[in-house]
Every structure is written in C-alpha cells, then in structure tokens.
Amino acid sequence: MTRVRDFNPTALDTHASPGLHVSWKTGWFFETRVWQFIIFLPRWLVSAEARERICTDEDQKNLEELLQRDFGGYTSSTTGILGVGHRGAAFEKNIHRQIAVLAARWRGTKRYFKALRKELEACSGEEQILILRQDLVIA
C-alpha cells in the first residue's frame, strides 16, 4: 500500500491518561501485573524491484515521544525485523521496527492501543498494523 500522510500523535490526546502508567509496588510479597504491548512499526516494503518507505524516521520519532509521554518510556529494537506474508496471492516482505511498552491493565489502555492502531493504519496506508498484547507478572 502507498503511504498516505505523516503520523499524527495528537490523534491519541483524548486517550492519554495517568491511568496508563504502571503502578510499581515494592516489597517482598508484591507482584505487579502489567500488559506489554509490542508494536511492529512498518518501515519498508521490500520487493524484487524496489524498497518503498512506509513509515518515516519522523513517524518513528513522534511515536516514540508519544509513548514516552503517555507511558513513561519504551524499548525499541535498533535493527529492522523482517516480516514475510501473503497480500492477496503474492508474498510480501516488510521491514519493521519493534517497539515495546509496559502499561497498566485497564479498559482505557485497550482503547488507547486500538486508537493507535487505527492512526498508524490511516497514516501508513497499511491494511493491518500488528500490535501484540501480553500479560506479564513482575515479581
């Protein structure tokens, strides 16, 4: 798909909340249950003929600043991750940047990441942006 526009971080402003941050508890007998979200940000579409940009360096920078503001931080891979799959009848290769964030477990967090997926799909022109959610227990 063809890139549509720049990523717009203000599209997430209505979903930002202090409730997104993980509440860290300390002590011998406390465990913190959190969600880890892993965002696969598509950077390049790779074909035999060319390499087409999907999301730009500026898109990635704006996304990372947004996650730092709304969640207090993130973890990002330093190299691209290759994804291969079908698009219609043809195989497609994408190079992604993997970005992970820890978040509080509540309804507002789910709404936030649903809105983030929608914004990333709208700006990138991609039919589906992969965002994974995992349950974690931090002991």
Image (cartoon, helix red, strand yellow):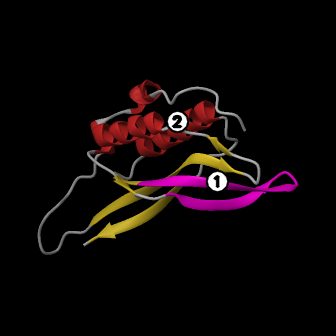
The magenta segment is 80-99
Q: Amino acid at mark 1?
A: Asn
Image quadrant holding the C terminus, namely bottom left
Residue at 28% across / 48% down in the picture? 73
Residue to which mark 1 is pinned:
94
Q: Amino acid at mark 2?
A: Ala
Eyeballing the image, is 82 above or below 11?
below
Residue at 61% across / 37% down in the picture? 121
Residue at 52% across / 36% down in the picture? 115
Image quadrant holding the N terminus, namely top right
- Kindly report which numbered mark, 1 or 2, lies closer to the viewer in this rendering: 1
Residue to which mark 2 is pinned:
115
Residue 7 on image: x %, y %? 50, 30
Q: Which mark is residue 49?
A: none
Identity of the residue furthest to the left in this view: 27
What is the secondary structure assignment of the residue under circle 2?
helix
